[in-house]
Image (cartoon, rainbow, N blue to C red):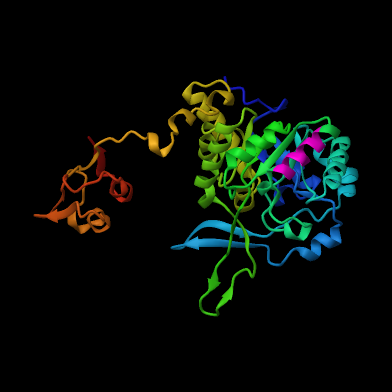
Amino acid sequence: MVDLRIDFAGVEFPNPVVVAAGEPGLSGKHLEKCAKSGAGGLVTKTIRIQSGPEILSFIPRPRFWMVKSTGHTIGMMNVAGSSDIEPKKWVEDEIPIARKAGIPLIVSINAGSEIEHWTRLAKMMDEAGADMLELDFACLFTYAKWGLKVPLSHDPILAAEVVRAIKRCVSIPVMVKLPAEVLSLGEIAGTVEKAGADAVSAINTIRGFAGVNINTGIPYLPHLSGYSGPAIKPIALRSVIEVAKAVDIPVSGIGGLMNWEDAIEMMMVGASTVQVCTAILWKGVGVIGHIVKGIEKFLEEKGYTTPKEIVGKALEYVVPYGELEVHPLKANVNLGTCTGPRCGICASVCVYDAIRSRNGKIKVDLGKCKGCGLCLQLCPVGAIELRI
């Protein structure tokens, strides 16, 4: 029987699926709704020192734009911003509602460049009953508004000072959220670990632009925005790997998780918990339960008893580029499955001219084949494999 409970930075979660900071956690009632749908933990929408009216005036409309390619939705741009609820109201009204859910509550905070603001906000949330803090060092859009020359995640000295100051004034675990757009993600993760951070979460949305309506010449969103959704999963996986290899504290993986398979992948590269946001916005809160049940079923079918057994399972197979073993693999076509020249996709995409149509059949020139693997992934009938 599978026990989905997992210890994360000293806090026990009933399962590893956590609601990420964002619209699903914009209030106590929203968080409570996510908990009832099966979440193992909750992260509030990021809370700032500034008042509600000031925050509201800063957020553009519309907030979201779906990004499509060849008719398929591949991601979403957003500029949803921080919470429009003031810290005092979170403490008095929203956090008590969220705590009724009975699962770990992580409060996300951001206070810009003033360490005194960070500590004041952190103490407020600790005293209000938060089980953990998530320090949002990942915001890449408003740092200049707060008087920062670069985002906090790009300033290791200030980042460490903020972590140390908060650790001195709170009694609960502190997690630092980092973005992908850092020159050395492992290095900054190691810096906040040395400063006392109990965990690291990665990543935030990716800085991007929604695009332009070519018929009018007008941008879909008139500002740079955060990109989320399935298209950023490879970047999130890379980031979790870099962090997991650099620190000994637990990692919470975020970015592009749309189903339970994505969650399993994220855990296998080093995440002890996974955070979900865009999937909830696209599919509704019911997706949380589907992800949890999918993880449980997978673990049971594979003979695992706890999620901890798969955390970091794939890390040993991730090696630096210079240490890769090169195998003389070549494309091999199963002529019994291949539909031949009437398809011809493999021949048309082979940049090495190794695949051609001859006598009504697809042939591979092994002398030219580089074993790149593109043809087998594009073959619609699965007729190609790589062999030595």
- Can residue 36 be seen at all in this image of the molecule? no
**Residue for point 55% across, 72% down:** 212
- Asked if residue 185 lies in the magenta stretch, the reply is no
Q: Position of residue 277 (x, y in %)?
A: 64, 47
Q: Position of residue 41 (x, y in %)?
A: 70, 36
Left or right side of 197 for 275: left
**Residue for point 65% across, 29% down:** 249
Q: Residue furthest bottom?
A: 216
Left or right side of 316 for 189: right
Q: Quadrant of residue 171?
A: top right
Q: Residue furthest left?
A: 359
Which quadrant does the C terminus fall into? top left
Position of residue 10 relative to residue 333, above or below, is above
Q: Quadrant of residue 288?
A: top right
Between 362 and 371, the one lying in front of the other is: 371
Left or right side of 228 for 105: right
- Asked if residue 166 lies in the magenta stretch, the reply is yes
Q: Position of residue 341 (x, y in %)?
A: 18, 56
Q: Position of residue 276 (x, y in %)?
A: 63, 43
**In the image, which residues are magenta?**
157-167
Overall secondary structure of the magenta section: helix
Q: Quadrant of residue 356?
A: bottom left
**Residue for point 72% across, 43% down:** 157
